[in-house]
Amino acid sequence: MERTDPRDPKNWIPRQLFAAYVGDSSDDLLAYYDKAVAKKNPMMMSFNLLAILVLPAWLGLRSQWVMWGIYTGLIGCLPFIEHALGINYPAGAVGGVSVAMGCMARGLLLASANGQYLKLKRRGLTQDAIHQALYNRARINIPFAVAGGVGFLMVALGLAQLAAFVSGRSFP
């Protein structure tokens, strides 16, 4: 099987298909796509206030549930590590990682779209079948944004409480 270079724009999801993937009212993402193609780098920093301030809600807004689960799981594991090792990690470290990931949120979305596109292409699907499979997969969905934000808080606080209970320490 031929290896593709993920930094080569000819291997990326076509712009029209990316537009269909992110749905209407996504001009900022299409501008990001054009800039990424010009620089041949899908993971560039960009400013998106919602992604920077509330990354889990942004991931929900764009239905990026795999990334949401990984981010939530990593943040949820920190209290267990903290209690098991008897250390306190600085809250600014978590905040800094969240801001950095928020600045790369558009790149993460483009990388996810590229990965899904290449997977469908390797399966030998026609362009119409690929379009149908990816159509509106990352469209704006306000209820999912609320679910992403509230769900993250519930999971993270629940796991922190569980970690405190298991370790015999009090929850701050």
Image: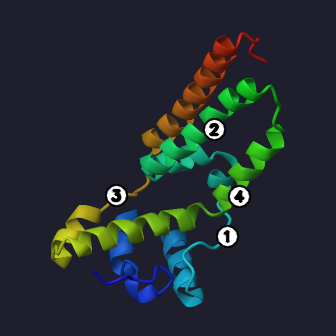
The x, y position of residue 167, in whole percent, is 69, 15
- Residues under numbered marks 1 and 3 in contact, where contact means CB atoms less than 8 Å apart: no
Name the residue carrying label 1. 45
- The residue tagged with tag 4: helix, strand or loop? helix
The residue at 65%/56% (across/down) is 102
x, y percentage for residue 114? 40, 71
Image vertical order of residue 63 relative to residue 9, above or below: above
Amino acid identity at mark 3: Arg
Q: Earlier in the sequence, mark 4 or mark 3?
A: 4
Please tell me how crowded label 4 is: few (under 14), some (14-19), or many (20+) other residues with Cα within 10 Å. Answer: some
Helix, strand or loop under label 3: loop
* Residue 80 left/right relative to 110: right
Mark 1 closeness class: few <14, some 14–19, many ≥20 residues within 10 Å: some
Residue for badge 3: 137
- Label 2 residue SS: helix
Q: How far apart in space, not on screen, are marks 4 and 1 (Cα)? A: 8 Å
State the residue at coordinates (44%, 41%).
144
The disc label shown at residue 100, or none: 4
Rendered position, 167 above or below 26: above
Secondary structure of the residue carrying tag 1 is loop
Can you say whether 103 is above or below 86 in the image? Answer: below
